[in-house]
Image (cartoon, helix red, strand yellow):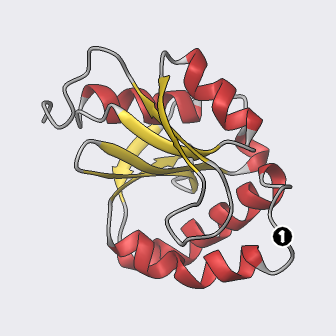
Amino acid sequence: MEIELTPVTGTEYPRLVEIWEASVRATHHFLRPGDTEFYKARMPACLRSVRLTAARDEAGRITAFLGTCDGNIEMLFVHPEERGRGIGKTLVRYAVGKLGCGRVDINEQNGQAVGFYEKLGFRKTGRSPVDAEGRPYLILHLGLPGVVCGAAE
């Protein structure tokens, strides 16, 4: 399976929100009732605040996406039906190698994400008791040793 990485247009935001919601429902079982809707309402603004890269299948359909800013991986979501095919790993390698990203913040309760990033070499650099919205979800700050953030293209 070939993975094509491309920029995202504003008209594709609804597809990104679909992928985000499906991914969150599959992996974020720790969220309290109503929190998925709370975060979903903020997604359009979040999408506008980052550099977006889409992974597309052979038909050109977006299957996953990456959002980066200032050396940080701000978001990485793979549609649950597409997991296990190397798409997330391809997007992270692109973020590190082409965009100079070496940091990511993830929910500590999302064990799948913790294992994924650790397997790719990221290490814990810190921890916060609340997320960016001030909600009580523990955030792990991870860094990739040896990467100078923002030093690539």
Q: Position of residue 115 (x, y in %)?
A: 68, 25
Q: Secondary structure under badge 1?
A: loop
Tell me which corner region of the image, top left, top right, bottom left or bottom right, holds residue 82. Answer: top right
In the rendered view, would you say 63 is above or below 44? above
In the rendered view, would you say 6 is above or below 96? below
Q: Quadrant of the N terminus?
A: top right
**Please, what is the three-letter code of the amino acid marked with disc 1?**
Arg
Q: Position of residue 70 (x, y in %)?
A: 22, 49
Q: Position of residue 52 (x, y in %)?
A: 36, 57
Q: Position of residue 152 (x, y in %)?
A: 15, 31
Local packing at callout 1 (Cα closer than 10 Å; few below 14, some 14-19, many 20+) is few
Residue located beneath label 1 in the image: 32
In the rendered view, would you say 101 is above or below 44? above
Seen from the viewer's position, the closer of residues 121 and 44 is 121
Counting the numbered discs, the total is 1
Which residue is depicted at the point 77% across and 48% down? 80
Q: Quadrant of the C terminus?
A: top left
In the rendered view, would you say 151 is above or below 14? above
**Left or right: residue 104 compared with residue 34:** left
Which residue is depicted at the point 48% across and 22% down? 122
Seen from the viewer's position, the closer of residues 52 and 61 is 52
Which residue is depicted at the point 35% across and 50% down? 6
Seen from the viewer's position, the closer of residues 46 and 126 is 126
Which residue is depicted at the point 56% across and 35% down? 88
Seen from the viewer's position, the closer of residues 116 and 128 is 128
